[in-house]
Image (tube, helix red, strand yellow):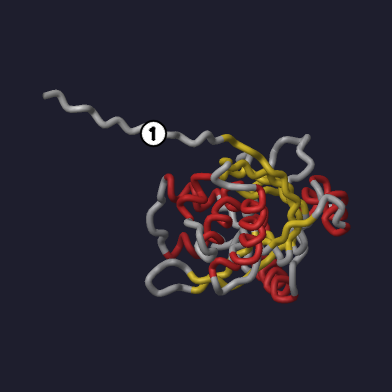
Amino acid sequence: MAKASNQETVSIMEIEKATMDFHILGTSPLILNRMSQKVLRELLLPRGRKTAAEKASCLKHNPEQEFRDSPYTIRDPNSPAYLAILSTAFKKAMGTAALDMPGTKKAQILRLIYVEGEMVPIYGIPKLFMSVTRSADINKTPDVRTRAIVPEWAAKLSVTFTRPIMRETSIANLLAAAGIQSGVGDWRQEKGSGSYGAFRIVGHDDADFNRIIATQGRAAQIKAMENPEPYDTESGEMLGWFSSEIVKRGF
């Protein structure tokens, strides 16, 4: 006797993409941390260990050059901003924020959201920031690192997400949480020891946001990169000592 076949109907939920535009305002300084060309070239084509004579005849650090190498920059002269950070920094911040929010998973959030563009333009005047860092070696060797820091900053970004799995309110809440719990850039809130790179969502009529956008764009940023000013007293003292010392040592 023939058996009746059991057939199950599979229903696939219709999904679509939606995009939300955000204006964000930094609530703590942003440290820009692009890997320098010097480090990239050494990774690509290592030179091997330097001899004592080679170490004595060349500078280990060049603070002003390290400052200029630390941010991502937008070469297009028509761009309203010169400084930028990778758009994935904001995406990762949202994914990290999901770890501490009930009902969300980082891997799922990263699959469902996309921050438009390769880089997000950053508005704000960069300063030269020198600080003691620890190397990744087993001894955690101390070193002095120079980076660009933006004391007050703003940005515009667009977040594309999958509907109806994600909703507009969820995206806004996730980005707001990312600004508080994760941050972007170096020594950010996510790392635990630092509190840099935090931000909040603001309206298009926010006075501080519009002031930074209007006065701290491309032209002002290029001028600041060409003529760096120390961010704080410690950076100024170290830069001043270095500048006079290299003259004494004949570099």
Figure quadrant of residue 224: bottom right
Instruction: Give the quarter of the figure containing the C terminus.
Output: bottom right
Give the total of numbered labels.
1
- 172 or 140: nearer the viewer: 172
Which residue is painted at 73% across and 51% down in the image? 155
Q: Position of residue 109 (x, y in %)?
A: 51, 51
Figure quadrant of residue 124: bottom right
Q: Residues within 10 Å of mark 1 (few under 14, many from 20)?
A: few
Q: Is residue 251 visible?
A: no
The residue carrying mark 1 is: 10
- 215 or 229: nearer the viewer: 215
Q: Is residue 170 above or below residue 112?
A: below
Q: Position of residue 92 (x, y in %)?
A: 54, 54
Q: Position of residue 76 (x, y in %)?
A: 72, 35
- 31 or 130: nearer the viewer: 31
Q: Amino acid at mark 1?
A: Val
Q: Is residue 179 above or below residue 14?
A: below
Horizontal arrangement in the rendering, residue 50 relative to residue 214 (left or right): left
Which residue is painted at 70% across and 76% down in the image? 234
Q: Is residue 102 visible?
A: yes
Figure quadrant of residue 53: bottom left
Furthest residue in direction left, as rendered: 1
Horizontal arrangement in the rendering, residue 27 relative to residue 33 (left or right): right
Q: Position of residue 213 (x, y in %)?
A: 83, 50
Q: Is residue 73 above or below residue 251?
A: above
Which residue is painted at 75% across and 67% down in the image? 230
The secondary element bearing badge 1 is classed as loop
Q: Is residue 79 above or below residue 84?
A: above
